[in-house]
Structures are given as structure tokens and as C-alpha cells.
Image (tube, grey):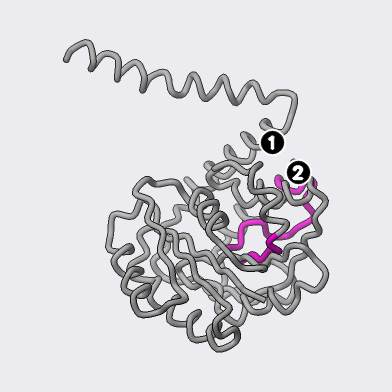
Amino acid sequence: MKLSIIIPAYNEELRIPAMLDAYLEHFTGLYPGNVEFIVVVNGSTDGTAAVVRDYEERHPEVSTMIEPARIGKGGALMLGFHAATGELIGFSDADGATPPKAFEDLITNLDDADAIIASRWLPDSKVHPKQPWQRLLASRVFNKLVCWFFRLDLSDTQCGAKLFRRNAIQDVLPHLGVTAWAFDVDLLFQLRRAGYHTIEIPTTWNDIRGSKVDVVRTSSEMFVAICRLRLLYSPFRWLVSLYNILASYPTRLIRKIRELKA
């Protein structure tokens, strides 16, 4: 059994070394010769690419994909899914919030399921430190909306540690789009639509210093993202196309004016 772990990385030069050190030591010991780490560096403006290339030179288990454009977590994961060669394919955040042992728990508890996700909000989950009420409230409201919109009976669609069987990912990958904060929801929704069984287990999750997430801005962006995604899977999908056209009009108009002035 070969394991592929995809790590999307955007401006993570300070945090990804500790994550890679821990994961390499843990999983190369468990699966010698049968584990690969695919780090997808996208849109980074710091030294993340150089840091990861250094690991690639020293560790044959590490491969690096560099995408200059800022394609987000979803775009990075889609690139990683296409490149992965394992029978089991998962992903984990570059900040190391999910410890290696917690990711290993996904593998040992997969059983007969097609996908398994880590949850920070099940009774036995361990989250350190305790999250501020604003972040907790935003997470719980988002989850309730997701369950309502997409009929996903899951407590935490956004935790950055998930694992899938290869056939399940290959089946739904052509139907996925780059949907910003809604990518995880889209992925889990597509798996449900295709008849695959997803389970979740409690996890250990550590809030690593250096997070670039603005709770207020992110919450609004997440809400817009899932509303847009829900429209895409409804008879009103034409509204999304209309919005895309209108949203791109100012940019196209400015470009045309500049061309005329030139």
C-alpha cells in the first residue's frame, strides 16, 4: 500500500520545515519506500519554494510542484491529486496543525470507508489552545449552513486533514472546480453524489502561530463561496454565470481603455 500526502503551501517558509521534519520522520518509518509527499507551492512571494526544493534534494520521498499563480488551496490540491501515485491519497496543511499521529489515525480508521476526515468538533477531539468564541461561532454557523445546503452529515468539513481511496478521488476529480473556501465542501459533496462513503473521527489539532486568517473577512468569503457553490448545483446556476460576466466587466473595460490610450 502506497501513501500519498499532498501539502498545499502558500507563503509557509517559516512553518513548513517543522511540519516536513515531523511527517518525514513519522511516515518514512511506517511506510519505508511506500510514501510520497507532494508539496504544491502556489502564488508564494517568500522563500517557500526554495525551502521545499532543499527538502526535495535531501529526501527522495519529497517532490515539489511550483505554480507561480495564486490558485489557492483547491487549485493546489487538484494539481496534487493529478500527480499522486498512492492507493491512499490524503492532504494536510503546511503549518503542521495536524500532528503526524493524528494523520496516521485517518489511515488506521479508514476500514471499509472510501474517505475519512479529521474533525475538531467531535466530543473526543483535542484542540489546542481553546479557540476564541468568534472563530468557534463562525465555524459552527458555517457547518450548519453546509449541512443544510448540501446534506452533509459531517461536523467539520474544513479541517485540513483528509484521506481518500484512489478510485474515489479519480472518480470525482473531473467534476471539481477551484471554489476558494468551498473546495473541501465541493469535494465532500461530489463524493456523496457519487455514492462514496465518508466518515469522520475526532482529531488532535494545534493552532500554530503565524496564521494569516482574518476571521471576519474569511467568514464572509466562506459564506459567499458556499452560496455560489450551492447555486452551481441548482436550476439557478445561470446566476453564477451572470455574476462572473458582470464581475469581469470592469477589468475588461479598463484593459480596453488602456489599449485605446496606447
Kind of residue sitting beneath label 2: Phe
Q: Is residue 219 above or below residue 55?
A: above
From the image, tell me which residue sits under label 2. 150
From the viewer's perspective, tell me whether residue 87 is left or right of residue 35.
right
| Residue 120 appearing in the image | no
Specify whether residue 150 is painted magenta. yes
Q: Nearer the viewer, residue 250 or 210?
A: 250
Residue 13 on image: x %, y %: 33, 67
Place residue 123 in its image quadrant: bottom right
| N-terminal label among 2 and 1 | 2
Q: Which residues are magenta?
A: 144-166
Q: Is residue 101 above or below residue 164?
A: below
Q: How many marks?
A: 2
| Residue 222 appearing in the image | yes
Place residue 85 in its image quadrant: bottom right
The numbered mark at residue 194 is: none
Kind of residue sitting beneath label 1: Arg
Q: CA distance from mark 2 to mark 1?
A: 7 Å
Residue 138 on image: x %, y %: 60, 52
- Tell me whether the residue at label 2 lies in contact with that at label 1, contact meaning CB atoms closer than 8 angstroms: yes
